[in-house]
Amino acid sequence: MQNDKPKLNQDQVGTLILIVAVLFGTWFRIMPAWLAGFPVNDGGMFYTMILDLQANHYIAPLFTTYNQTSIPFAYPPLGFYLGAGISDLLNISPLDIIRWLPGMLNALCVPAFYLFAKEVLNRKFQSAIAALVYAVTPHLTSWLSMGGGLTRSLGMLFMLLALVHIYRVFATGNRQSIWGAIIFSGLTALSHTEAPIYLAAIAIYIWLIKSRSWMGLRDGALIALGVLTLSAPWYGLVISRHGITPFLSIMQTGAHSFAGVLKILNIALLTEEPYLGILGALGILGISVLVARKDYFIPLMLPVIFLAQPRSGHIMGNIPLAMAAGFFITEIVLSGLEKVTGSKKSVAFFTVLAIYLLSNSMLYGLALSTRHLPNSEIKAMQWVEENTPEDSGFLVISGEQSAFCDLTNEWFPSLTERQSLTTVQGSEWLMGNGFAGNAAQIQTLQGCIDDGLECFEKNSEQFPFEYVYISIASPTKNCEASNSPTTRGLVIALENTEEYSIVYRSEKVAIFEKK
């Protein structure tokens, strides 16, 4: 008599899918840094802030030394203390901390997302599918894993864990979760500038949809009081030193505008899939079905996120989008296939889809790994550090008109210990509503790299500079991989004028001194 092989139930399959999501999600988040050999994209300012902490014996200094512009050391410090502590404890270079730690923290966001999805969807299998979507969404493997993802990934991790407990408090009346909500919300507030804004907005939204009771309001007040108690020492220190001006300044850089909120319509911006936008389509279809069923909680979370803070809505918006995609795959796609073709063929369909999505993420990661500072620029910046006066002012021209992807300008102040007048990072703490105008001026100046002297002089006259650093072969243009030109129009123009003398020249970099 032949025994039938036991079949896995749906929850067991969900466990296997979650394991796959965590394993592949981890790989996609650390692979770009491994291939790059240097922090991917940004992180220069955070690298300097870790060094500042170490040099000051873990007492937060008044200002960071980054770019010599007296930027207040006001940024939520937990990521810097974590990075500095690991660096000293394990004798690891802070540069390697910026390279590896963001991806590792981002990998932890996958199981944290699953926990939140399980609270909302209330089904293990569906939540595991949603976690797999979250794990392979290309955009979440980039911005949270780059060098600057040190704080972004930490803020996302604690925010997701806080939402798990907040949902339990408001949706199920589980008052034992108040402590977890306080602890993880407090850690969120100490990790990132924007994550607490999203956390507060989503928490209020959960209360409005799932509770709307006086008991829930009381519990929310207790959580808010606890978070204030945990975060008050840091924010109190910053306010005692600098007043509230830095916070007022940074609050004016959140891209709060009608156009910023309308970015919600560009789902490709959220998932950043390089080829066919399957994940975004699945998410929108899931939202559509949920709305048709008059289940509005997940669909409305997306506009809540963009209304709270448009600037990083393209990252945080993937939380409800991945849940909606998980819902649509399980409730509509797999359910429909099983009815039409049988369970075995539906498994085959899902397997093919998973292989495509994993391949898509792999190709995206390979492209992302090229977005790092090349050795030629590192050598040029070392020359600047060793051969120019410490108080020199530089115009760093890379041709990259998006400040978020201008890795040359981001890393120049950190590796040279000189001031870059064209570096945007950090100025959000100083310029307030002048930040956007300054960024636009710098963007216009960057566009002069292939033009003549007239464009450069017209757009640089407001900057008091002594040197011009030109990155001839910047790896990106408008955040997309670019070809490697052998020269630039601005290099030729400066070489042929008597007002500038060339002091450094390599195949990839030209540095001019203003006479």
Image (cartoon, helix red, strand yellow):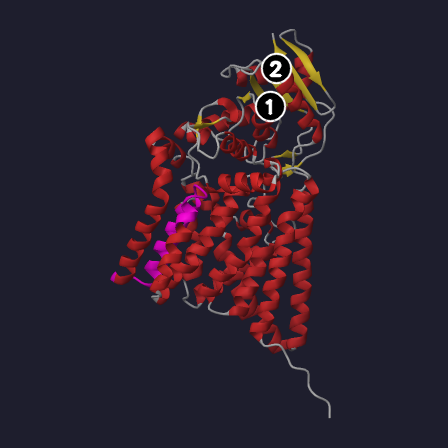
Q: Nearer the viewer, residue 434 or 199?
A: 199
Residue 284 visible (yes or no): no
Image quarter of the N terminus: bottom right
Of helix, strand and loop, which one carries label 2?
loop
Q: Is the residue under label 2 in contact with that under label 1 (CB below 8 Å)?
A: yes
Quarter of the image holding residue 396? top right
Q: Which mark is residue 416?
A: 1
Which tag, 1 or 2, sits closer to the chain's start?
Answer: 2
Residue 464 visible (yes or no): yes
Tell me the amino acid under the disc marked 2: Thr
Magenta residues, start to end? 186-214
Quarter of the image holding residue 325? bottom right
Counting other residues with Cα less than 10 Å from the Cα at mark 2, is it few (<14), some (14-19), or many (20 or more)? some
> Which residue is found at the position 41% from the left and 62% from the top?
296
Outermost residue on the left side: it is: 214
Image quarter of the C terminus: top right
Residue 492 percent across, percent down from the top left: 69, 16
> Which residue is found at the position 35% from the left and 59% from the top?
178
Q: Nearer the viewer, residue 477 or 33?
A: 33
Tell me the amino acid under the disc marked 1: Thr
Give the vertical position of 391 relative to 480 (above or below).
Answer: above
Of helix, strand and loop, which one carries label 1?
helix
Residue 206 is covered by the magenta coloring: yes
> Which residue is found at the position 68% from the left and 70% from the top?
348
Disc 2 marks which residue? Answer: 388
> Which residue is found at the position 72% from the left and 31% from the top?
484
Give the vertical position of 427 relative to 366 (above or below).
Answer: above
Name the side, left or right, on which 464 lies relative to 185.
Answer: right
